[in-house]
């Protein structure tokens, strides 16, 4: 049986950053259900927040708590904001190329819910820039192995302590992988929804496993609906229209061509306003106008959005585009502290998979990449001090049995959706049709 010091399930920003902060003498495995690049982190358009200066702390802190409806963990929010400068310096050291002004200083933008422009970006593909760079650095490490098209289907557990995972390859073969620690960085649950900005394979597997294993979950019904994705009647993942376009002046219009909401309010407020407006007018989308943004600024700051809309026959420099809300992000998840520790020993959860309380009931725009990096690095530091490289570990006497892939996926879906409905029936009734 293959043995590792640390297994990381998920190859988004959180999983990659954790791997890069583990010791070089640790044998590390990164595995993903799909292609290496196909994480939701890769899709992030808007940017990553950072503390502008010490005087900005009270304002940034309040913006985060206000968006989270004051259900945030003060400890987690403080840790995230205080660590932001270090994280940005780390990313630049790894080679991330943030946009800069003509004088070479970093360029900041503002998004909904932020009092000030404190968001760094790389055009409108910030996630792609960060993830691509982190993948390059991971591939340079001899101690990190990458396994694609491999699913984690269960955990190996001995006396309440995690000892590895049960993996399943693309051909359906299940096999055990031993580890001193396991990090769950599998993202959220967008694949369970008909309309989502997430990749379809990101379908809440970790949460189903946690429900079966009695691992503590928290607020699984705290699911963020993004106000603006490009409307389409075709099936598949929806293309997100970054909130930063509204920060730069794009306006939401109803079927009558009238503005109906302040576009810079938090996402949940804007999404609900759109839902109500569509219900009032009997439409399945509203319109987003770029008329107040110059063509030069559109082509400079939002080239990816411009090209993608053109592929759909929409020229954002000439006309408004149809947009609608879609499932976007999970604030709840597997309960974890600010170092990623869960209710099971030697099991960690980071990124969107974790609920450490930093987002409260609703995530402030562009806090997700920052949160993923801060707490995944924290988890790596704890693991460095608790796991001994190359140590043999006790394994379960019998391996867990799992049903065939389609049956397993269907049961996972049932378990997770039932938990969402049980914890938040109002959300389920309001948004289950998206």
Image: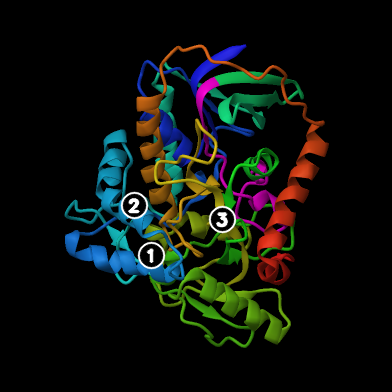
Q: Nearer the viewer, residue 203 or 208?
A: 208
x and y percentages locating residue 400 in the rendered image: 73, 26
Mark sitting on residue 64: 1
Q: Could you say where residue 13 lies in the image, as x and y percent from the top left?
A: 45, 40
Q: Secondary structure at mark 2?
A: helix
Along the line of sight, which residue is nearer the eye, 152 or 234? 152
Residue 395, placed above or below residue 18: above
Tell me the magenta residue range.
179-205
Question: What x and y, as percent, mark residue 349?
Answer: 51, 40
Q: Which residue is mark 3?
A: 330
Q: CA distance from mark 2 to mark 3?
A: 18 Å
Residue 184 seen in the current view: yes
Q: CA distance from mark 3 to mark 1?
A: 16 Å
Q: Earlier in the sequence, mark 1 or mark 2?
A: 1
Residue visible at 58% across and 13% down? Answer: 2
Going by the image, does 193 lie left or right of 367? Answer: right
At x 70% / y 74%, what residue is drawn?
284
Q: Which residue is mark 2?
A: 80
Q: Main secondary structure of the magenta part?
A: loop
């Amino acid at each position: 049986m293959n043995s590792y010091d640390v297994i990381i399930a998920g190859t988004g920003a959180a999983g990659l950053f954790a791997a890069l902060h583990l010791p070089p003498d640790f044998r590390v495995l990164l595995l993903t259900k799909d292609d290496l690049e196909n994480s939701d982190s890769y899709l992030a358009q808007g940017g990553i927040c950072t503390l502008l200066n010490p005087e900005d702390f009270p304002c940034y802190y309040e913006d985060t708590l206000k968006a989270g409806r004051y259900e945030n963990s003060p400890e987690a929010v403080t840790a995230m904001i205080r660590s932001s400068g270090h994280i940005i310096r780390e990313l630049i050291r790894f080679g991330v190329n943030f946009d800069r002004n003509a004088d070479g200083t970093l360029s900041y933008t503002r998004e909904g819910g932020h009092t000030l422009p404190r968001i760094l970006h790389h055009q409108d593909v910030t996630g792609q820039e960060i993830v691509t760079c982190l993948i390059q650095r991971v591939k340079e490490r001899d101690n990190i192995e990458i396994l694609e098209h491999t699913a984690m289907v269960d955990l190996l557990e001995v006396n309440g302590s995690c000892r590895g995972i049960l993996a399943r390859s693309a051909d359906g073969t299940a096999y055990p992988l031993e580890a001193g620690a396991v990090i769950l960085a599998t993202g959220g649950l967008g694949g369970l929804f008909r309309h989502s900005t997430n990749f379809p394979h990101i379908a809440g597997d970790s949460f189903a496993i946690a429900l079966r294993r009695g691992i503590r979950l928290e607020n699984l019904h705290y699911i963020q609906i993004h106000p603006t994705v490009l409307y389409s009647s075709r099936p598949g993942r929806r293309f997100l229209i970054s909130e930063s376009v509204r920060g730069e002046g794009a306006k939401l219009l109803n079927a009558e061509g009238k503005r109906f909401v302040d576009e810079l309010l938090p996402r949940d407020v804007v999404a609900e306003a759109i839902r109500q407006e569509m219900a009032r007018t009997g439409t399945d989308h509203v319109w987003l106008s770029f008329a107040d943004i110059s063509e030069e600024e559109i082509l400079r700051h939002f080239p990816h959005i411009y090209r993608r809309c053109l592929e759909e026959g929409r020229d954002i420099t000439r006309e408004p585009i149809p947009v609608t809300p879609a499932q976007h992000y999970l604030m709840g998840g597997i309960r974890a502290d600010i170092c990623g520790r869960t209710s099971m020993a030697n099991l960690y959860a980071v990124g969107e998979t974790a609920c450490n309380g930093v987002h409260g009931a609703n995530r402030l725009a562009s806090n997700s990449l920052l949160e993923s990096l801060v707490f995944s690095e924290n988890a790596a530091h704890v693991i460095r001090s608790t796991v001994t490289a190359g140590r043999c570990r006790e394994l379960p006497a019998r391996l867990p049995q799992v049903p065939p892939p389609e049956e397993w996926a269907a049961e996972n879906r049932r378990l997770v959706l039932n938990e969402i409905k049980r914890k938040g029936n109002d959300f389920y009734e309001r948004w289950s049709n998206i």
